[in-house]
Amino acid sequence: MVAAGQGLSTDEVQSIREALAAGRKPRVVFTSSAGQIAGQVGQVVELTDPAVSDEFVVVRFGRDELPFSPADVAVAPRGAGRKAAAVSVEAQPEPEPVVEPEFVLDTPRVPAQRREEPRVEQEQELAEAKPARRPVKAAKVVKPKGPAGLTVTLAYADGEWTVAAQQGAKALAKPYVVKPAEALRMVALVDVPGVQEAVEQILAAERAEAEQQAEKLRAELAEIEARLAELREAG
């Protein structure tokens, strides 16, 4: 049995990934967190996606290939597992690997069917010792995008009131002129303090200016009518 390490570091995981890419199967030793198989030697045959599960190190142990986390295995020292394999070949010619050769040398041979039973029990113990895999998070539901916002603008400039409408970046209605009374009704729908007062002030200023112009025009008209009356009397 080989002494167990402290688990794989990030650099060791990257080294194993490069070795697998080169066609090699690095040897690892099970740590104490692996349970009853601590100290045994296996071969890494695959590294799955660590984002899917923490147990992404697939190790071949005997005839089984089981997933483990990096904390369950460590890099095996040089020569680990080779001597045991050599003794197993000399003492037992069967192709089936022997877990502990020293104990097999003193044990009488038994039928193949009975030797399979400890393996089944070992698989059950490994399954019970390993923690349950974390559930995969459900995909986030993306809500459908709603329609673009609608903007209606009431503006006053150069003595005229205009209304325009735009949805997103698309202009639905270019600015067009509306009467002051219509502008005042639109503003009355907006319950914001100060807005209606500002519109009323603008309308009052326009009304005063219009009255001044009307008064001036009436004076000019009266002057013209008087002149016309003089001309009629002279004729």
Image: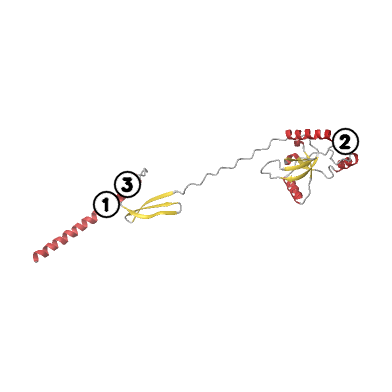
Q: Secondary structure at mark 1?
A: helix
Mark 2 / mark 1, whichever is N-terminal: 2
Q: Which residue is mark 2?
A: 104
Q: Is residue 202 left or right of residue 113?
A: left
Image quarter (top left, top right, bottom left or bottom right) of the N terminus: top right
Count every numbered label the image shows and give the total: 3
Q: Amino acid at mark 3?
A: Arg
Q: Is residue 53 left or right of residue 219?
A: right
Q: Which residue is mark 3?
A: 185
Q: Secondary structure at mark 2?
A: helix
Q: Is residue 120 above or below residue 48?
A: above
Q: Secondary structure at mark 3?
A: helix
Instruction: Assess whether mark 2 and mark 3 are in contact (beta carbons under 8 angstroms).
Output: no
Q: Amino acid at mark 1?
A: Arg
Q: Amino acid at mark 2?
A: Val
Q: Which mark is residue 207?
A: 1
Mark 3 / mark 2, whichever is N-terminal: 2
Alpha carbon of mark 2 to alpha carbon of mark 1: how far? 114 Å
